[in-house]
Amino acid sequence: MEFSSQAGVYVIDTQTLPVHKKKVRPLSKQGEYESRNLWRHVTNALRLNDISTATEHKSLLEGKQREEEKHRKDKGLPFPTKYFQRSGEISSWVYKGQSSSSKAN
């Protein structure tokens, strides 16, 4: 993998990096709109190599998300966020909680 920054171009050989197991709450403890919960039917179908069922569930999910966005737009409602809020007119985002540096003080 190659990326660049102001300091230069870097290449990382991802094959040599250690693999870390994800720490994810069980689906039963996830909220309705958490990603793994939303996409569980697509994921299960893909694990079974059932592409048509995965595609069907993906289309249903994305269609529902489009309808929800249209509803918010029609009503002038903002997208509900949990961790960030829009700040100023330039559409920057600010973390709603305390930063790790402010917790130490």
Image (cartoon, helix red, strand yellow):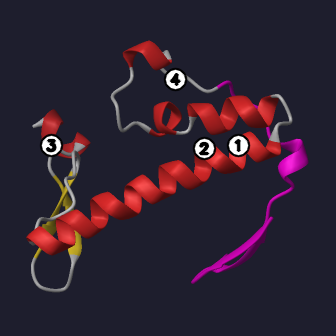
Q: Are marks 1 and 2 in contact (CB under 8 Å)?
A: yes
Q: Which mark is residue 24?
A: 4
Structural crowding at the residue carrying mark 1, measured as other residues with C-alpha within 10 Å and reported as few (<14), some (14–19) or many (≥20): many
| Image position of 47 with respect to 60: above or below | above
Question: At label 1, which amino acid type do we have?
Answer: Ala
Which residue is at 55% across, 22% downward? 23
Quarter occupied by the C terminus:
top left
Which is more foreground, mark 4 or mark 1? 1
Question: At label 3, which amino acid type do we have?
Answer: Gln
What residue did someone put label 3 on?
A: 98
Structural crowding at the residue carrying mark 3, measured as other residues with C-alpha within 10 Å and reported as few (<14), some (14–19) or many (≥20): few
Query: Residue 85: horizontal and vertical position, in percent?
Result: 15, 60
What residue did someone put label 2 on?
A: 57
Q: Are marks 1 and 3 in contact (CB under 8 Å)?
A: no
Q: CA distance from mark 1 to mark 3?
A: 39 Å
Q: CA distance from mark 3 to mark 2?
A: 37 Å
Q: CA distance from mark 4 to mark 3?
A: 23 Å
The numbered mark, 2 or 4, whose residue comes first in the sequence reads: 4
Which is more foreground, mark 3 or mark 2? 2
Query: Residue 54: horizontal and vertical position, in percent?
Result: 70, 43
The numbered mark, 4 or 3, whose residue comes first in the sequence reads: 4
Question: At label 4, which amino acid type do we have?
Answer: Val
Which residue is at 15% across, 65% downward? 78
| Apparent side of residue 17 relative to residue 70 in the rendered image (left or right) | right
Which residue is at 21% across, 64% downward? 71
| Apparent side of residue 50 relative to residue 84 in the rendered image (left or right) | right
What residue did someone put label 1 on?
A: 54
Quarter occupied by the N terminus:
bottom right
Q: Identify the image quadrant of residue 42.
A: top right
The numbered mark, 1 or 3, whose residue comes first in the sequence reads: 1
Q: Which residues are magenta?
A: 1-21
Query: Residue 9: horizontal and vertical position, in percent?
Result: 73, 79
